[in-house]
Amino acid sequence: MTRTLLALCLFAATASAQTPQDQQPTPAPAPPPQGTVLFNRNQDTEQPQPAAKPAPASQETIKIPDAERNSLTFTAYDLDVHITPASSHLAVHARFTVRNSGSAPLERLALQLSSTLQWENLALTTPTGVQPLKFVQQTINTDADHTGQATEAVVTLPHPLAPGDTLDLSAIYSGPIEFSARRLDVIDAPPSQAAHADWDAITPDTTALRGFGNVLWYPTASAPLFLGDGAKLFQAAGRTKLQQSPATFRLRLTVEYVGDAPKDAFFNGRREPLLPITENPDTPVANAPGIATADFAPQPLGFRIPSLFLTDRTATPAPNNLITTITGNPDAVPAFAAAADTIQPLLADWLGPTPLTSLTILDHEGQPFEDGAFLVTNMQHPNVSTLTLPLVHSLTHAWFHSSHAWLNEGVPQFMSLLWIERTQGRDAALDQLNQQRIPLSLAEPAGSQPATTPPTDAQTSSSTPQPPAPEGQSLIQATDELYYRNKAAAVLWMLRSIVGDEALKHALQLYRRSGPAEQDPHHFQTILEQTSKKDLRWFFDDWVYNDRGLADLSIANVTPRELPAQGNKATSWLIAIEVRNEGEAIADVPVTVRSGDLTTTERVRVPGHSTASTRIVFEGNPDEIVLNDGNIPETTATTHTRKVVTH
């Protein structure tokens, strides 16, 4: 298999160096008997123009600065996609809009596809027609694609593209997409792990394409990224999700098949049935060629990487209607259904009695993948006891949705913590919360971050993307899952301790019924203030709208004073406790006086780089002070104790 993949990569590199006369475009598929044109290789069917072919490739790679490659933001996609599973072939007529989100004019564009795909032509579309564009293809090294390389079209523009301006482009490209783990092979990943991680391909049995960071099946633009270079690849994927979340995406899909028609297509987690058109109804099904189509209407892309899956199996709802499965292993379905039944009371209690949709589970042996309420995972050898925890996260997506990543991913992570608390106890949940805090504490800023405010609607739709902070990320603009999952779950856990379970439950249930109002970044705060009857601006400013890092708490001083005995009451003490916060983020922290099983707790609010005091009356002889019970994420320890000296 390694030699085959190497041959494919060599073919891609050779093809990029061919002259226009050497290139042989793949013929367009024949239209169905009805005469409907499902795919057209002309750039504009109403005003056909001579197609611009790539210029002969230079012997040397054209050097393009990273800033230039990163200056392109895609704001709209409209793709006609033709897939031939039998030959692993993909052919696309793409219309897309790009914006110069950089600070300097662009005299050229650098557009990328998987290294096994080839650009056939590119054109500029204007109200007056189509203008072919000159371009050169080259192969660049990047792990944004599973082959470890990309085919880059360096496009010469007739006029520079000014910062903030957009261009409407169209392109035709094609080629095979087969299994490849070359990018993992070069860093000596074990073959079994490489195959488990890089499973994107078009094959006679399955089509699975996960997009940027896995396989570049649609036009993209990015500086080269490498798996061995820390987390830069994953961080770039997160920035791309945030920058291009407002982009609209339309997909018209055509699948060429022989025998039984494929059943469904899943694009960005959305399902559409594939409608078959058989060329000769009298031919036996096993030998009959045909075409199946699906049309995905334009929708905002949202905080995701575009993905496409095809399946030839029927989606089957479970009796509980909580999950729908697509699998060749029907014996696994009862275990998944039982796990969903077990989880359902928790989700109904916190998020509402019924889900917004059913969770669709596609059986696949590779590394799990999810997009909202669409889950791709291995359904072999299931066990209910091991299924429940991972399913909590996925099922939460069926109950709850937000256009803001910190809520859309943070709430499922929070529900997972609640499930651990319910099944294993509070200490186990706090331990898991602390494990999620450790990598976050390493990524959080060490110093003060400039104050910001939540983006307005105008800022959200602005032509200038919001760059990530040099250190740390506010939750409302987070692009790293350390923030929009780990920190978001910690923030929700803190809010639970501040407002109480019932107020938070009510707020989550109201929020999921908000409709378009939820796009306002302040909306969740507004609802939670209504249900809790508390002013929470101080909290959201430090923990959601800005990144102040984590708290850094300590017990600065403890002063006990014995109170005069009153009647038959036991001796009591008035204990003054001073708490210091060396961190930037404000903390509303519990302070507990303990003696054996007897405890008294008060909360104290400590701003960043400040101290605050509280006084606690304790009936009995105090033994120790406990600051923070694990609820507040800190830079180091999350619980602090000090013995009380009363003599």
Image: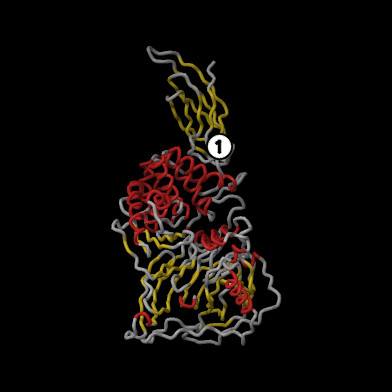
Q: In this view, does 391 lie above or below 62?
A: above
Q: Is residue 425 visible?
A: yes
Q: Position of residue 101 (x, y in %)?
A: 58, 65
Left or right: residue 552 versus residue 525 is right
Q: Residue furthest right?
A: 60
**Residue holding disc 1:** 637
Q: Residue at x 47, y 52 (%)?
A: 406
Q: Is residue 269 above or below residue 80?
A: above
Left or right: residue 3 versus residue 524 is right
Q: Quadrant of residue 270?
A: bottom left
Left or right: residue 544 versus residue 526 is right
Label 1: which secondary element: loop
Q: Position of residue 487 (x, y in %)?
A: 51, 47
Q: What residue type is labelled 1?
A: Ala
Classify mark 1: residues with Cα within 10 Å, few (<14), some (14-19) or many (20+).
some
Q: Position of residue 399 (x, y in %)?
A: 36, 54
